[in-house]
Image (spheres, helix red, strand yellow):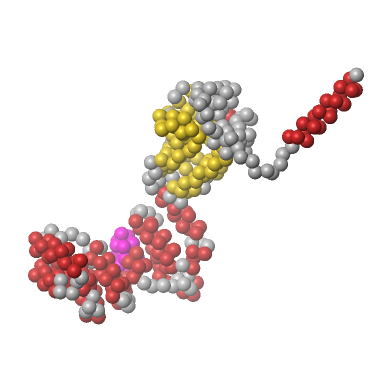
Amino acid sequence: MFKKYFTTSALFLVSVFAFAQFHTLNIPQSSPKVQETQKLGVTNITINYSSPSVKGRDVWNNPNIIPQEGNPIPWRAGANMNTTITFSTDVLIEGQHLKAGTYGFHVIPKGNTYTLLFAHNNDQWGSYYLDIKKDVTLNVEVESVESPFSEQLDYEFLDRTENSLIIGLEWEKRRIPFKVEVDLNATTVSSFRSELRGINTYHWQAWNDAANWCLNHNTNLEEALEWVNRSINGGYGGFAANKNHRNLSTKIKLLEKLNKTTELQSTIKEAKALYANAYDANDFGIFLLRNGFYQDAYDYNNSNFKAYPEAWSIQLNRGLSQYFLGNIKASVKDIKKVKESAPERFQNRLDEIITEVETGTYKL
């Protein structure tokens, strides 16, 4: 009798096993997988999760859907496999440091307070086997807020600035927000150093843009000067050198900020002597004006207007140079001459500029 029962049970198990074995069919899921990606500075943030639906349930208060107070386990912050969050650089989570990497994301609710767990053991089915003492790298506490109704659980990237954003887990009418911050200067400069060793090393624009970013963020200025010199002079044997007004302008601004006066003057002289068509000459003339090099601006615009007498915009730059040098009559005279050749659509603005120059109220 026992042998017969065992044989029948074994056959039943084989049958169930055969029926339940895994396959690769692409079948629609009730809680489909979702991947959300956001770039913060140069930091890539990627969230992978499975998104369940409310389906009329009281999801936040039903312990069979979201375990409360970690009893018996934390919540997987989604469905199926644990939710994962990947940071390509080091970050701050609610002000606490977290190294670059992929983390399993789990949540312990306690009333309106939520403990967020970032687990280096990130490849788990749900939270069933999460060891909070051994597997969790970081935990932080946050408060939930109300949000517009969301039938499907999802993650939103909110309130983004240059170096921070809020990640919000949203489901039903509740959002669990937490702040992510990056060291924008450190991560960006580190990224530049790496990228400039690759294919970008052959492009003068890359070296110049990296230097210009540092200039605009007032960081890493000495190395930025090396980078813009690489843009101008090229690499080994002068390979990929490209001296032009764009990278010379970046160098001029860096030298001014670094108070390298002697090299600054020689670089301005070098840029003024560089050949330019009328379009580029106009741009560089404006650059000199905007950066307060008024005598250089006058000399440059004056010589280029002689080379391009039909370029009314260069004559305008010359007139504005006169204004900033205190030669108001000469400035007004130049700008009135500009009106004779400038297109009709600029006439009203030129009249306004003349008035502003005469009253000393003109600003670039």
Residue drawn where x is 40% and y is 46% of the image: 163
Q: Residue furthest top?
A: 1
Residue 86 visible? The answer is no
Q: Position of residue 36 (x, y in %)?
A: 50, 44
Q: Nearer the viewer, residue 44 or 4?
A: 4
Residue 177 visible? The answer is yes
Q: Position of residue 155 (x, y in %)?
A: 48, 38
Where 305 falls versus 110 (above or below)? Answer: below
Q: Is 262 covered by the magenta stretch?
A: yes
- Quarter of the rendering occupied by the C terminus: bottom left
- Where, by quadrant of the figure, is residue 49 drawn? top right
Tell whether 18 sits left or right of 107: right
Residue drawn where x is 60% and y is 30% of the image: 127
Q: Nearer the viewer, residue 259 or 76?
A: 76
Tell whether 354 sits left or right of 134: left
For the magenta stretch, what is the residue range?
251-265
Majority secondary structure of the magenta segment?
Answer: helix
